[in-house]
Amino acid sequence: MTTSLEGALDPTPENQAGTTDPAPRLSLDTAAARNLATTTKTPPQMQAITSRWLLKVLPWTQVSGGTFRVNRRLTHTLGNGRVEFYATGSEVSVIPAELTELPGLAGFDDQATLQALAEACVQRDFVPGEVLLREGEAADRVVLIAHGKLSRRGHGAYDNETEFDVLADGDFFAADALTAAEPGAYENGLTALTSGTVLTLARADFDRIAENSEALTAHLAAARSRVPGQRNASGESEIALAAGHVGEPALPGTFADYELTPREYELSVAQTVLRVHSRVADLYNEPMNQVEEQLRLTVEALRERQEHELVNNPDFGLLHNADPRQRLHTRSGPPTPDDMDELLAAVWKEPSVLLAHPRAIAAFGRECNARGVYPAPAEFGGHSVAAWRGVPLLPCDKIPISKTGTSSVLAMRTGLERQGVVGLHRTGIPDEYQPSLSVRFMGISEQAIISYLVSAYYSVAVLVPDALGVLQDVEIGH
């Protein structure tokens, strides 16, 4: 039997097995060539890195002792018929002396008793549409409105539900519930129109404090009026001056009173432990240093968390530290040019910047387009950014969006000299890697894992209330 090589070497598609052979390669395969080549590569990428405009616009103040104290002049206005509050983070308290704005306490001057009444007030936060009080319920507490809008509703002349008026910041409801001889019932109810905060003082707590205070008992028996002291337009005690006089009149004496318990801000910290196996650090450091890249990404994550805390932390975050009088609400839901004008008016002394979630900026752009208004951009930090009335409008994705599709817009005046908003940090710390951020070697474990402690120290302070304004409940949907 003879065998022919003709069929085995036949280049035609049909072979003896009936298969199709690929064409022979004329050069080296790229898959094989990559084994001998060094690829062009990027450093590790991280999608969570943002522009972090807030960290860029804040002027940073050195805090050497770890605590920053904000001294202010004593500020509150008596005799204007409105109750005033102060906020420590998200906790809102009534100024004890402001309780004398309630008709039943007008002229009462026992500071210890007023302090006890203020401490007995209970904070309650509410959302739009929430019913705080119902008509006909037992009138067992007074409601002090720290911020937000509430509708006073009840049955009208024709037995239909009627809105009698709207109560807002500084107003109070059912003040006679504390001083009436016998508890009655609420003639009207309260329904929230916006989100906000109220303080309630229960009749039972009021009676308990009155039993232990002879001064309050005597005052309730015979209330007397009190002439309020002079105050300036900002509510600070007036500094007596003489101007335009001739001759040698006696000049008035004066002094500037201060807050007795000024706010103190302690530096907060964000920390993590970076772990890298020594084998990785030794063998895989070319062409990029693995430890440096791991550290770079860790620092980026810490800075993102730092900005989030500066906005949202309940103790010092900007959203929680805006004065109740500096919290505004939109007219119709979306952020209109009119709303932004009101916000700038709240921070009218040299506003520096506006911050909003990118979707809130888009919603504002839609409202401008609908009105045929086209704001001119502004140059800021070498970038052309959106602006309103010449004030840069910068994106900040750390400002939250609620489940109902609303957000907030911040307006700030920044700088220590301008009595604005300042960032707080501490430079010169041991093992400093960046300003106020340290990287400390923690050792090598028995598993040959190298550990580094990465720490960032920071906080933010609002020097005077009108340095920060917040436009709340901004609707961002279409």
Image (tube, helix red, strand yellow):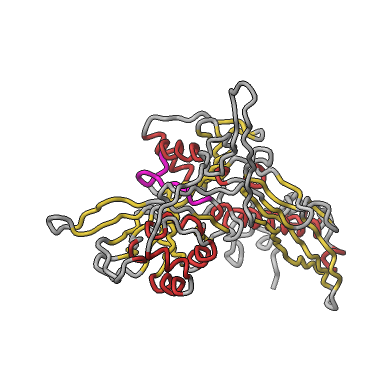
Task: Pinpoint residue 251: horizontal percent, then vertical percent.
Answer: 63, 32
- Apparent side of residue 226 relative to residue 381 in the rendered image (left or right): left
Q: Is residue 52 visible?
A: no
The residue positioned farthest toward the bottom in the image shown: 446
Residue drawn at (50%, 56%) of the image: 97
Residue drawn at (59%, 38%) of the image: 239
* Rendered position, 376 above or below 432: above
Task: Pinpoint residue 297: horizontal percent, then vertical percent.
Answer: 72, 56
Which stretch did the figure color magenta?
323-336
Name the foreground residue: 414 vs 113: 113
For residue 416, which quarter of the picture?
top right
For residue 198, which quarter of the picture?
bottom left
Q: How many marks?
A: 0
Name the foreground residue: 249 vs 338: 249
Task: Pinpoint residue 438: horizontal percent, then vertical percent.
Answer: 80, 58
* Rendered position, 31 above or below 3: above
- Apparent side of residue 106 relative to residue 271 in the rendered image (left or right): left
The residue positioned farthest toward the top in the image shown: 246
* Rendered position, 121 above or below 51: below
Locate the N terminus by quadrant.
bottom right
Name the foreground residue: 12 vs 336: 336
Name the foreground residue: 46 vs 363: 363
- Apparent side of residue 83 relative to residue 173 in the rendered image (left or right): right
For residue 364, which quarter of the picture?
top left
Residue drawn at (76%, 65%) of the image: 274
Q: Is residue 196 visible?
A: yes
Task: Pinpoint residue 184: horizontal percent, then vertical percent.
Answer: 27, 69
Q: Is residue 255 located in the magenta-colored stretch of the structure? A: no
